[in-house]
Amino acid sequence: MKSNSVSLAVDEFATGSADSLILIGRVLLAWVFVGSAYGAISDFSGSVGYFRSLHLPAPELFTMTNIALEVLISVGLILGVGTRYCAILTFVFVVAATAVAHRYWEYPAGGQQVGQYNHFLKNISIMGGALAIFVTGAGRFSLDRALAK
């Protein structure tokens, strides 16, 4: 019976803290995009070089578009504005990024392949988080909620 009381306590905590936990989840999900956008802005030529190495057309335009989308995703998730649309944008963006940049199976066995596989798995997790935010919405602590009143 002890496991039932633990289960009940966990359920009560999740229910009672849902809005705070959704906010924390949104911020944690956005954090990877904040860091990535900052890195791309800080080392624009390095980002362009990376996209050039992937043989993408117009790597400068691709880099600028990437930065703009990552900033939009970051702001939308953190502030909770247009959250469901932002969650879908996040999902689609990460699917595209994974397909373009993290095809681990194309790398020789070893360190590079393992690194790309880890990025691939991270992106799968981000997609799951984006779907969870899509389903739950922004929660009480969001501009979406404030603007709806």
Image: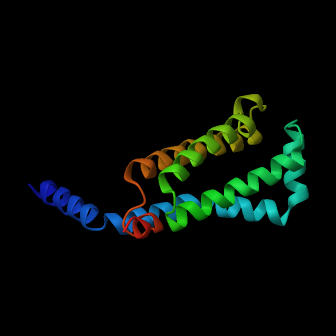
Residue visible at 81% across and 54% down in the picture:
64
Classify the position of the C terminus by image quarter: bottom left
Which percent across, then down, holds residue 143?
A: 47, 68
In the image, taking residue 37 as reference, residue 30 lies left or right, namely left
Q: Residue furthest top?
A: 106
Residue visible at 73% across and 37% down in the picture:
113
In the image, taking residue 37 as reference, residue 4 lies left or right, namely left
Classify the position of the N terminus by image quarter: bottom left
Q: Nearer the viewer, residue 132 or 149?
A: 149
The number of numbered badges drawn on the structure is 0
- Indicate whether 104 appears above or below 131: above
Q: Nearer the viewer, residue 48 or 81?
A: 81
Residue visible at 87% across and 59% down in the picture:
44
- Indicate whether 149 appears above or below 55: below
The quarter holding residue 114 reads top right
Which percent across, then down, holds residue 50?
A: 85, 47
In the image, taking residue 94 as reference, residue 23 lies left or right, namely left
- Indicate whether 105 appears above or below 130: above
The quarter holding residue 108 reads top right
Which percent across, then down, holds residue 80?
A: 49, 64
